[in-house]
């Protein structure tokens, strides 16, 4: 009788462990997901620059584009219709940077600059809710302004 009870307890425990592990994985994946709602690309240098941008979500390419940006030019891109674990890759000449985006609804800024005499790609992601209401309501697919 004790052996049967031990086997039954072990099976119930194993099933509970598998269920907990499965639910825990789902919760962890949900906590890591991001949604990119707005992206800004900016050239803060004094020359025309070529910039390639790639957004991946869970290993799949979601967005890939190359831009030719004039000095001071800003390009704004709408978000993507996909939620997932995002990573952004940026290439400017021989310089490549990447960043895993934080979880939540995000806005991303990519800036080309010479902060201390060296070329630098600055990638910043902030909560979308931190943007002003006018920035949140802008519906760009691609807009440039060099002012």
Image: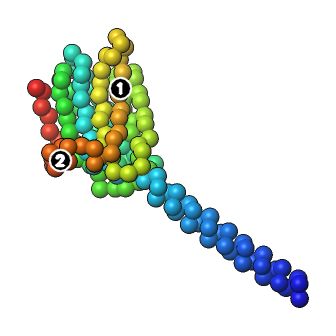
x, y percent for residue 119: 35, 17
The residue wearing badge 1 is: 121
Per the image, label 1 sits on a secondary structure element best described as strand
Q: Name the residue: 35% across, 35% down.
A: 124
- Report the Cα–Cα distance between label 1 and label 2: 27 Å
Q: Which sits earlier in the primary sequence, circle 1 or circle 2?
A: 1
Category of crowding for the residue at label 2, using alpha-carbon neighbours closer than 10 angstroms: few (below 14), some (14–19), many (at least 20): few
Look at mark 2 in the image and give the residue it sits on.
133
> Is 76 above or below relative to 15?
above
* Residue 24 seen anywhere in this rendered image of the structure: yes
Q: Position of residue 92 (x, y in %)?
A: 34, 25
**In the rendered image, which quarter is residue 63 located in?**
top left
Residue located at (41% from left, 30% from top)? 97
User: Residue 60: in sight, yes or no?
Assistant: no
Q: Are marks 1 and 2 in contact (CB under 8 Å)?
A: no
Outermost residue to the bottom: 1
Name the spot of residue 108 as percent of width and height, x first.
31, 40
Q: Quadrant of the N terminus?
A: bottom right
- Nearer the observer: mark 1 or 2; the answer is 2
Q: Residues within 10 Å of mark 1 (few under 14, many from 20)?
A: many
Q: Residue at x 36, y 13 (%)?
A: 116
Q: Is residue 9 left or right of residue 101?
A: right
- How many discs appear? 2
In the displayed structure, 96 sits above or below 138; it is: above
Could you tell me which secondary element the residue under label 2 belongs to? helix
Q: Which residue sits at x=15%, y=45%? A: 134
Name the mark on residue 139: none
């Amino acid at each position: 009788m004790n052996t049967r009870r031990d086997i039954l307890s072990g099976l119930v425990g194993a099933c509970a462990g598998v269920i907990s592990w499965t639910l825990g994985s789902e919760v962890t994946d949900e906590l890591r997901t991001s949604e990119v709602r707005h992206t800004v690309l900016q050239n803060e240098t004094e020359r025309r620059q070529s910039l390639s941008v790639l957004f991946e979500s869970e290993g799949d390419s979601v967005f890939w584009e190359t831009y030719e940006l004039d000095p001071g030019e800003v390009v704004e891109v709408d978000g993507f219709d996909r939620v997932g674990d995002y990573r952004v890759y940026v290439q400017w000449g021989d310089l490549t940077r990447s960043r895993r985006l934080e979880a939540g609804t995000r806005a991303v800024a990519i800036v080309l600059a010479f902060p201390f005499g060296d070329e630098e790609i600055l990638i910043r992601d902030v909560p979308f809710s931190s943007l002003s209401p006018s920035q949140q309501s802008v519906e760009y697919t691609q807009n440039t302004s060099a002012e």
